[in-house]
Every structure is written in structure tokens, then in C-alpha cells.
Image (cartoon, helix red, strand yellow):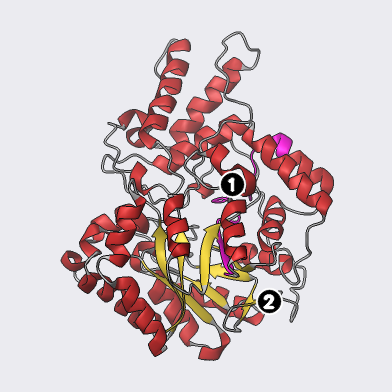
Amino acid sequence: MSEEQYNRRDFLKIAGTVTAATAVTLAGCSGKERFSRGGTMELPTGEMTYRTAKNGDRISLLGYGMMRLPTTNNKSALELDDEIDQEMVNSLVDEALKYGVNYFDTSPAYCKGRSEASLGIALKRHPRDKYYIATKLSNFAESTWSREESIKIYEKSFKDLQVDVIDYMLLHGIGMGEDGMKVFNSRYIDNGILDFLLEERKKGKIRNLGFSYHGDIAVFDHALSMDVDWDFVQIQLNYVDWKHAKEVNTRNTNAEYLYGELEKRNIPAIIMEPLLGGRLARIDNRKALNKLKAADPEATPAIWAMRYAGNPSGVLTVLSGMTFREHLRENLRTYSPLKPLSAQELDLLEDVAQTMLSYKTIPCNTCQYCMPCPYGLDIPSIFVHYNKCINEEKYITDETDKNYIQARREFLIGYDRTVPRLRQADHCIGCNKCSPHCPQRIDIPGEMKKIDRFVEMLKRQGGTTTV
């Protein structure tokens, strides 16, 4: 499609810019990389845990999320000019299939619109009956809400994925926006697109139809009340969001409720954000991390979180965006087979969640839906740096504290090294182009003002504007 047809800039503002603030190295407020490095341990063959879909599909509990594909410069996500490392994508897909992964999740929105084509190339090299493809009708931009433009997006997915049938099709991100119900109706109901997709399911072009949910709970409840036989639903679930999503943000919904509503209707759940945007894989809160290490010194935080996400019996598959081979291998070991959590372990993770929540961080998952900022701010990196310093107890405002001078220096130096000066919080003008697109519904301009005030306070108290 042409840029005019697709309104690419609007589209990317909402869902297409996928980078990795999670990979940022923070000077002064940095912790050691806590992902498993893959090791030399032999990978388990033939031991993957599988769950059964409504239509009888045997789905691997580990699903491959294709949102953050590897690039030729060995980064963990795509920058504007980065090229996808197709050879590496092929290799990772080959290894995933070899050890039992058969569910691959993508979207027209991912990786600047290149994820579907890359996945199509990788999977085309394998027999079609060895894998299931999930993609989405990602008509986020208002210019794509018409029936004609939405169908163009749908048809392009088949072309890019090089398939005649899509196994799992989702309405993408229902509930997002300031008026979630109005947007839902505009994207899928008023234009007849949901009816169109239901007809495509009848024809066999789509084998399973569902939706992914972010935001407005009224839209979630409404979708479940509709006279639609949903084959599956994709929700955010992890051990923090299970009971505490509303504590993180009052407009979020606890995963316990979301999962419970699906369980009552016998609708399988697809899980996204099992690591809470990477925050549960690189736990920066030392108290929380020590509790996990005391329980199992060999298990990484990511292993704990992935075990939790796969634990409920109604979960069909857990999506993980495995950019690097070590991430894939650790997850393969975790789910081959899955070791169910004991009651004691579930209590431990609830305790860890409460410990993390006692530190008032910003609930950013670095999904990048807020980007690009029209004024150049690097919103996710600003939040990542701020959160790490809080978790490492280096957010100190009292000049009389014995650690104040060192903490002040580390925060300011780390801030400048992590976020270029022209992309820092003081450049936010409060236009609020970002907040409506945030799945976590963060008041981004408000948080930027808070961070800017904190930075300016540190500079003034040091008697200089530089460190």
C-alpha cells in the first residue's frame, strides 16, 4: 500500500515503533544483565508442554512473539534505520520449531510493518502443518477505519505471510484510547469489519477469531457479551498484574478478573506481557530480587515469571518476544516441560509483587506505542532510567542523607548518558499526543513534569546546571 493509503505516520505513532529501552545500559543506576546467557546445557527434545485449543489444535505453551526481531547491528529491537537480520530470524525460528514451538504471533504494526514479511520468509521454509500463525487486524490509524482500508490491511497480511489461511486472527488492542468503546465501534463494528471477519472464518480463510485487550474494561466486557463465538482472547497476565494492575494504574484491570471471565466462558487465554515489558526479567528492586534468589539461586527472574504465566490451566500459550537465542533457550527449558508452581511459590511471587509495588515506579512496559514523540522525547528511556534509580534506592531528595551526593551524581550522569539532552523530559510541551496510545494509560505529560522537576531540583541543589 502507498503511504497515503496507509497513513503510515499515524499508524506508527500508535503501534509501529518498537525499540528496546529495556536494553539500555544505565550509568550509575545500572544492574547486571540478569537474562540467562543460554549456556551449554543440552536443550530438551520432545518435552514441550502443549495445550489444546477449542478446535483441537495442539498449541505449544511457549509462543513466539515477533514484535522485537533481531537486527543486523545485533540490537534487541528496531531503530528507524535498522535492518532485520533475516538470517538470524530464520535460525531462531528453526530452533524454536525443532524444540516444539509451533505458535508464532505477529502484526502489521510490528517492526515498522516488516514483522509479517520476515516471519513469512522464515516459516515458508517449513511444512505448513508444522506451525500456527497468529496476526492481527491492526487498523489503529483513523484513516484505516473504513471498510476498504481495513480490508487492505487484512489482505496484505496474507501476502506478507505467504499463506492462504491465517490460523489465529485478532482484533488488535480493543479498549485503547480515551473513548475505548467509540474507537472499538469505529474500527470493527460500524464499518462491518467484524462481520466480514466472521464470514472469512466461515469460508475457512481464518481458522480462529479472537481479540487482544488493552485498557477500557467496558470494551472487554462488551466484547464478551456479544453474540460472537470467540475462539480465544489475548490478555496481559503476570504475577504483578494478577491482583495489582489497578494499584499500578487505576484504569488498568487485574488479570485475575480478565482470566476469570474467560474461564467462565471456556475461552482459552493467550498471554502477553508475561515479563511486564521486561521488568520481571530484569528486576531492579534488590529486596524483591533477593527473595527470588533465596528461594532458588539457579532460577532467573524471567524463569519465575514465565512459570507463573503458564501456570493457569486455561492458558493456551504464553507469548515471549525472544530477540536473542539465549532468551529462546531459557524459555524452551522452562516449558519443556513446565514445572507447575506450588502454593508456597505462588505466595512467594505475591510477596515479591507487593515488594516491587512498595516502590512507586512508573508502570511503563517499554512497548513504544507512545512513540515517536513529535517533539523528539525518548519517553520509554526516560521512564526506564527513573524507575531503575527508584528500585535501586537512589532516588534521594534529602541533602542531609549521607548518600545524597553520590546518588545525585549517579542519577544526573546516568540520565545524560542514557537519554540525549534534546530528548529529555524538559522538552515535553504537554501536547498529550502520547497518552491516548499508552496501553498502561500513563499520564505521560504529568510524569514528564514530575521527572523534570526532580532533575532541576538535583541540579539546583548541586549549585550548577551540569555535573
Residue closest to the eye, 466 or 38: 38
Residue at the disc numbered 1: 279
Please count the marks in the image.
Answer: 2
Let me know if residue 112 is in the magenta part.
no
Observer-nearest of 358 and 198: 198
User: Residue 29 location, x and y as percent?
Assistant: 58, 33
**Residue 260: % across, % down:** 61, 58
Find the magenta span and give its range: 267-288
- Give me the residue at 26% from left, 58% from top: 141
Q: Residue at coordinates 70% horizontally, 50% vertically from top-left?
A: 301
Q: Which residue is mark 2?
A: 50
Q: Is residue 278 magenta?
A: yes
Name the amino acid, label 1: Arg
- Mark 2–mark 1 Cα distance, whole angstroms, equals 26 Å
* Residue drawn 34% across the image and 67% down it: 113
384 or 170, nearer to the observer: 170
> Residue 39's x, y, as percent?
73, 63
Left or right of 292 in this view: 458? left
Which badge, 2 or 1, is on the more N-terminal residue? 2
